[in-house]
Image (tube, rainbow, N blue to C red):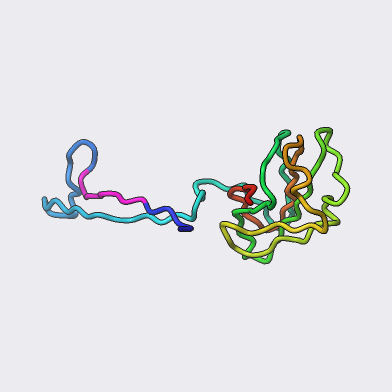
Amino acid sequence: GDELWIYYRGSNQDHDNIIDPAANGKLMTGIGRAVLRLDGFVSADADHTGGQITTPPLTFQGKHLELNVDTSGGGSVFVELLDQDGQPIAGFSRHETVPVNGNSVRMPVHWNSDISQLAGKLIRIRFLMRECKLYAFQFVN
């Protein structure tokens, strides 16, 4: 699924085996579940002033790029692909990408060009973000 479930046990007893005085000496325990979005342990955040992240050079396999992203605060992400020298690749600049908006663990990124032509080649990815939480990205078939 799109969530991580983490089960845990909690009590009113601390690590020195001292029970919370407010419990009048009664040990209370319970089992809980924490829910996180898939790969949601940490995010790169941009506020209304914006921000950007550029990856180190990488290669990929696949036909599509997907983001795990949350722009539900009215924000957006523009994604551009760069050559290994940091220059935009024709067909994949920030001006040729469709802005990404929404909240999804598998949000597709679209350009007017076919990303699969770059598979196996050394590239960088630049994320230009505003009001956004970027958790992860992946290339998929």
* Residue at figure coordinates x 45%, y 54% from the top left: 36
State the residue in front, 53 or 10.
Answer: 53
Rendered view: 83 above or below 46: above
Q: Residue 105 falls in which quadrant of the image?
A: bottom right
Compared with 51, 16 (above or below) is above
Q: Is residue 9 magenta?
A: yes
Q: Which of 47 and 82 is in front in this view?
A: 82
Residue 34 in the image, given as x and y percentages of width and height: 37, 54
Identified at 51% across, 49% down, the residue is 39
Magenta residues, as a range? 6-13
Who is closer to the viewer here, 56 or 70?
56
Picture coordinates of residue 1 (x, y %)?
A: 45, 58
Disc tally is 0
Magenta-colored stretch includes residue 54: no
Farthest right residue?
90
Residue 99, given in percent of the width and then of the height, sits at 75, 61
- Which residue: 82% across, 53% down? 94
